[in-house]
Structures are given as C-alpha cells and as structure tokens.
Image: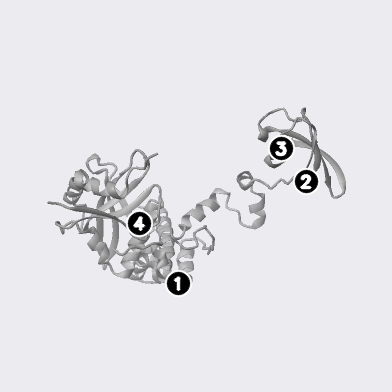
Amino acid sequence: MPTFRFSPLQGARTSVKRAVGFLEDENDASIDAAAGFASLKENHERTLRARFDHWIDGNSYPKYYHGWPDLPRYKECFTFKWDENQVHHRLYGFLFNPKPKSAPAFRVCVLAYHDTKTDDTDFTILDRVNELRTSAGVLNAIRKVYPEERS
Amino acid sequence: MAPMSNHWTERSIEDFVHRIASDFVLQLEKKMDAERMNQKELAAKLGVSVGRVSQIMNNPGNLTLKNIVQYARILRMKVSIVAYEDGDPENKNGPINSEIFYRCWQRVGKPADFFAFASNDSIRQEIPSPKVWTYVGFWTDEARPSPKYNDVTFYSLSFVGGEEKQESGTSPDSVVIPSAKPQEVRI
C-alpha cells in the first residue's frame, strides 16, 4: 500500500506564487526524485537549486525547466533539467495548487521521478507522473503541507 | 533532507557565489539565444574550448570576475556589481535575481548617470518629492470645504528665509485641526 509523503524543498526562497517539493513513497523506490537530488554532487546540486530559485522567482527559461502547456494530456507535467558529464538529467513532476480557495495563484511543483534523457521526451514517464497527479493519496499528502487558509 | 531555516545560499560563500553566477549565466544564455549564437561560436570568439564554455554554463561557480567581464563583452554586454539591502539580513530568501535589477534599470529609461537618473520623469512619478510645508497659518471654515481630511484646502502664511509667503494647497494629515474656529497651526 502506498504511503506518500511530500516534503517542501529545504532552503528555497518563499513565495506566495510558487514552491518546489519532493514526493516520496517508502514502498516504491521508483519515485526517486528526492533520492536523486540528495545524491547530487555539490556543484550540480547548486546548479539545480539556482534553477529552482529562477522558477520560483517567476523567471522563464525552457532550457532549464519547462512544462508541456500545448499537450492537454500533459499540461500539468513539469521538468527541471541539468547536464552532468554530458548526460542530460531530468526531474519530472507536476504542478498543483493545494489551496485553490485561499491562494488561487499558488502552484507547487511536485517532483517525483529522476531520469536521464537521450533523444525525445519519453512520455511513459509523464504518464506515470499523471497517475500520481490524480492519486488521492498523493494530493492529500501535499494538502497536509499546504492546507487551505481559513479567512 | 536536513531542515534549513535560511536560504541555501547562506550555507557558504561558495553557495552564494554559485547562485549569483548562475543568474549571470542565465543572462548570457538568453543573450546567446537572441543572437542565435551557440556555445561553439562563443568558444571560438573567446579563444577557449567548447568544453570550457560548457563547463562554465553548467558549473558557473568557478567564474572569476575577469571571466564574467570577458564573456559579457564578447556578447557586447556590460557588467555592474550591485550591492543592496533588501530587508533580509539573515538571508532567508536568497539574493534578488540580477535580471530584476536589469529590468528596473530598463524601465526607468536606462539612465547612464546620476543626472539622467534625477531628471527622469518616470522616476519622478514613482518617487513622490518630499514637499515639506513649514508655515504658521490659519484654518477657517471657508478653507475646509470637504470633511475628508486629505481633501482639506488650507491657506497659510509661511516664513521661508525670513520672507512672508502666502500659499494654499492640500493639507497633509498632520496639520488638520478638527475645529470650526480659525486655528493657528504650526508644524
């Protein structure tokens, strides 16, 4: 049985618009974005953190991170990118607003999978992201961290 | 993941350097995209290997100030170093992205010196000039046509440089006297 846990990225800047965090399931090691991030060498970790900051700040640069807004099936999916020893690395996840009533503009990027990329995007990983995105257990784990604020 | 109460750039000087160098590299990459220049062409212009450029782009923490200027000048850009206070002395939120400063400078008309900065109309509109009224004057019922204090008109006698001067204008909140009788006010 899945036991999802969501952890906001530690050391990130706070924003009322955007946040980044990691999804984990202690019974499913394939949900490995957090483990992949934790195992990064110092400089790659810094590079990725800087890219998280850029996105949280509202900057836009598809070479560093992007979604698929033109593909309805994957329009909530999102990826952060970096290169390591000429290998293209990706963290895949999805954008979600856990508190649509009290903060309608807020989006958290929920990172789930770490993968390396060769040619075109492997959409099977985005399908797996979509499965998580529609799982009540996943959404509840995120909402626990970002509850609706009562007015 | 270990909890961090401050922004990650507070862990070490190297972290902070890496972050602001990353902001610079992002500016370079955007400029290269606009100029349709790839890393190979940039390397050729700099007289370094493509591997070196790629290394800098992926790991900007090793950039020196001299490298930064070299890379910027090749792309016909200039570099300024900006120190600022943002009300976050403990660095809980990390540095302000350098592109924010760049866009602000563009927005106020790209002033090239302090004279241009001071004479810029858009700056004047955004930063209200400190109009200090120093006067001794009288409030009258006639001079107070509106019950809203911010809209109150006043007449005043002011003594500026020893000369008496009569003025009228809109009252600042601090000089409103809630009385129907003429009042002497002093600020």
User: Where residue B150 appears, x then y in whole percent?
Assistant: 66, 35
Residue position for label 4: A52
Given the current orientation, which residue lies at the most extreme left position?
A1
The one nearer the camera, A85 or A136, is: A136
Q: State the separation of the CA atoms marked 2 and 4.
A: 52 Å
User: Where residue B187 appears, x then y in whole percent?
Assistant: 76, 45
Tag 1: residue type? Thr
Chain that bears disc 2: B
Q: State the separation of the CA atoms marked 1 and 4.
A: 23 Å
Q: Nearer the viewer, mark 1 or mark 4?
A: 4
Residue B176: mark? 3
Q: Nearer the viewer, mark 2 or mark 4?
A: 2
Residue position for label 2: B134
Q: Are marks 1 and 2 on the same chain?
A: yes
- Disc 4: CA contacts within 10 A as few (<14), some (14-19) or many (>=20): many
Q: Earlier in the sequence, mark 1 or mark 3?
A: 1
